[in-house]
Amino acid sequence: MVILEARNVSMVYNSSRGPVEALRDVSLEVREGEFVCIVGPSGCGKTTLLRILSGLLRPTSGLVLWKGEPLREPKPEMGFVFQKANLMPWRDALGNVLLPLEVRGINGSEALEKAFSLLKSMGLEGFLHTYPRELSGGMEQKVALARALVYDPDILFLDEPFSSLDALTRERLNVELAGLWRNRCKTVVMVTHNLQEAIFLADRVMVMSPRPGTLKAQFIIPFPHPRDLSLTFTPEFAALARAVREAIEY
């Protein structure tokens, strides 16, 4: 079932130098339970498209449909993780994850159980009362991911959440994210610059053109789930990564 759809979406920003066309006539569909990655050159409008798909930004023209209805603002069924964890520095890890539940009026043992379960699944049960300044970058992003998942959203929007992390930490979090996606049956739309990350995680990789961004290619990822990091060293993976890179460059 198609859960999210963009129809002929375009976006023009007004700047001091005049109009800047960020997106032109983008149409796409995302099916329920699918993991979609969006890649493309810097400045092609990937983040703009993600913000439009999530209702955080209204397009200049075109339409976004969420479960068949026009989307004009973010919905309670949507979760978000951005490049920076943006954790509340005065709250410990558990307190940060509990925040969305508190906003929704969910408190007490039910909230604690949900938050603790997610943090434990990410290996953070020993850091429940640790503050953001005391966490590593990878741990901060795990807390941000747990915060986005704690109220059980239908779809998760990820804007390069692991871009600031070292390569090994990023690989470990990719494996953990893939496991969370499978176990919780979520729909995920993710923007990334990392082609290996996109191919390892996604069911489909969408390639955008240079600005004004349009969708110029789409790749169905043939590798079955679950995937192991050893996949990334296979000739088949390398060939697909090369094809995606060529689509971006040409």
Image (tube, rainbow, N blue to C red):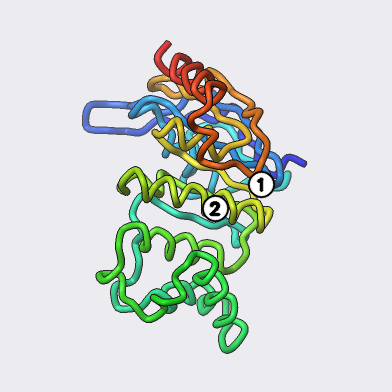
Amino acid at the residue labelled 2: Glu
Q: Earlier in the sequence, mark 2 or mark 1?
A: 1
**Residue 237 in picture, x, y percent from top left:** 53, 26
Residue 73, label in figure: 2
Q: Quadrant of residue 211?
A: top left
Amino acid at the residue labelled 1: Trp
Q: Quadrant of residue 184?
A: bottom right
Residue 66, label in figure: 1
Q: Is residue 168 left or right of residue 38?
A: left
Q: Residues within 10 Å of mark 1 (few under 14, many from 20)?
A: some
Residue 124, label in figure: none
**Residue 210 in picture, x, y percent from top left:** 39, 20
Q: Secondary structure at mark 1?
A: strand
Query: Is the C-beta separation of discs 2 and 1 under 8 Å?
Result: no
Q: Residue at x 59, y 24 (%)?
A: 219
**Of the two numbered discs 2 and 1 in the rendering, the one whose residue sits closer to the viewer:** 1
Q: Residues within 10 Å of mark 2 (few under 14, many from 20)?
A: few
Q: Residue at x 30, y 46 (%)?
A: 166
**Residue 95 in picture, x, y percent from top left:** 42, 79
Q: Residue at x 61, y 39 (%)?
A: 64
Q: Is residue 93 left or right of residue 151?
A: left
| Residue found farthest to the top | 250
Q: Secondary structure at mark 2?
A: loop
Mark 2 vs mark 1, CA separation in Å? 10 Å
